[in-house]
Image (spheres, rainbow, N blue to C red):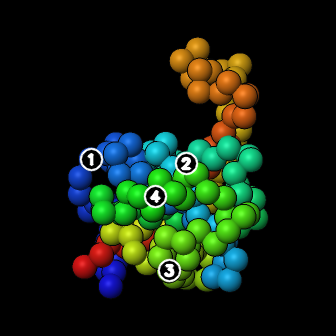
Amino acid sequence: MFQELDPKALQGNVFSLFDDRWTLITAGTQDRCNTMTASWGGLGVLWNKNVATIYVRPQRYTFEFLENTSHFTLSFFGEEWRKELAYCGTASGRDEDKFAHCGFHVAMAGEEAPYIQEADLVLVCRKLYWNDLDPAHMDPCGLDCYPEQDYHRMYIGEITKVLIRE
């Protein structure tokens, strides 16, 4: 069971959410969606809105869902789900049902935003902006992350709802 929380009432270290806990980025519809693990992202304020920023490579299956929908969710889990999150970061939803493999269940926040019911924290985001990372503007340390020159697309989403497990 989840309760809704004001984004400004989030507790804890926002850097730790992505770097240590990881997240599942989910987009699509109730009947057709995909999820992927991410450890890069951020939270902040842009255009007077609470926002989340995520980065997805174009070859990821979730990319097409992000491109074709107005919303995405970020689901954060406890350490007991680490194995499943690692799996969702390496297996492709093109090839199998990752939800079933991991024992995850999809729920909907409104009509546009699928999320994972087993999460402890869910950020529901409405896509505001996207842009492809440009290597011409990167510090050399960033270029080291792209030996295949498969640069991420950055998405910024307004956090429209925060759900926290009771």
Is 146 left, or right, of 163 in this rendering?
right
Quadrant for the C terminus, please.
bottom left
| Cβ–Cβ under 8 Å for marks 2 and 3 | no
Query: According to the image, label 4 marks what residue?
Result: 85
What percent of the width, then of the height, locates residue 138? Answer: 62, 21
Helix or strand or loop: what does disc 2 sit on?
Answer: strand
**The furthest residue to the top:** 140
Observer-side mark, 3 or 1, equals 3
For residue 13, above or below residue 127: above
Query: According to the image, label 1 marks what residue?
Result: 13
Tell me the amino acid under the disc marked 3. His
Residue 54 shows which numbered tag? 2
Marks 3/1: CA–CA distance: 27 Å
Quarter of image, res 71: bottom right
User: Local crowd at mark 4 within 10 Å, few (<14), some, or many (≥20)?
Assistant: many
Q: Nearer the viewer, residue 23 or 47?
A: 23
